[in-house]
Every structure is written in C-alpha cells, then in structure tokens.
Image: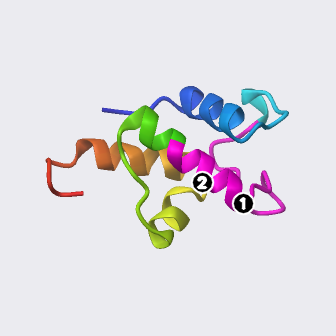
Amino acid sequence: MTVDLAELKNLLIENCMLRLSPEEIAEDTPLFSPEGLGLDSIDALQLAVAVEKTYGVAIKDSSVAREALHSLASLRDWITRQKNEPAGQG
C-alpha cells in the first residue's frame, strides 16, 4: 500500500485549516519549523487524529510523532511502513 501525497496534502490543509493550495506545499517542506508551515501542537494533534481515522494507524508517542510529522514525505513513508507491516508488528 502506498499513500497518495495529494491526499495527504488535502488532509493537512483541511485538518490544520491552512490557507494554502496543495501546490504550495512541497513534500519536503518542514511542517513545524518557522521556515516551513509553522504548525503548532494543536495542529499536530489534529493531524494525528486525522491520520488515525483515515489510515487506521496511530501515532502513539512523541518520538514517533517527531519522525512521522517532520514533512509530508516522512508522514507518507511512515504511514506506508505501518500499513505494510504484518499484523502485530507495529
């Protein structure tokens, strides 16, 4: 299973109420850096809930969140790894 980047961009825009178009967000743009999108902890929570609802995988702790929510590319890769792991492994 691979995760569609355009779908992730829309998920991000809708759940974090960004006033951007999907084309304005590069897959390697940092999500939480001031040089990137500048999201905050509330955005992180909303995005984590949306990822769990949409893809059925939970971001369980802060170290996982730091890895998974660095950029859309890292989030896509993390979700893909979670979905492709055998049951009980992740």
Residue annotated with mark 1: 32
Q: Quadrant of residue 52?
A: top left
Q: Position of residue 5 (x, y in %)?
A: 54, 32
- Quadrant holding the N terminus: top left
Q: Which mark is residue 45?
A: 2
Q: Is residue 34 above or below residue 81?
A: below
Helix, strand or loop: magenta stretch:
loop
Q: Secondary structure at mark 2?
A: helix
Q: Residues within 10 Å of mark 2 (few under 14, many from 20)?
A: some
Say whether residue 80 is left or right of residue 22. Answer: left
**Mark whose residue sits in front, 2 or 1:** 2
The reply to whether residue 36 is in sight is: yes
Residue 7, label in figure: none
**Percent of width and height locating residue 87:** 14, 48
Q: CA distance from mark 2 to mark 1?
A: 12 Å
Closest to the observer: 32 or 29?
A: 32
Residue 80 pos. (x, y %)? 36, 43
Residue 9 lies within the magenta run: no
Task: Please report the bounds of the magenta region as a residue range.
Answer: 25-49
Q: Residue at x 71, y 42 (%)?
A: 16
Asked if residue 27 lies in the magenta stretch, the reply is: yes
Pick the quarter of the image with the C terminus. bottom left
Q: Residue at x 59, y 46 (%)?
A: 47
Q: Judge left or right: residue 78 versus residue 1.
A: right
Horizontal side of 18 relative to 70 (left or right) equals right
Tell me which label, 2 or 1, sits earlier in the chain: 1
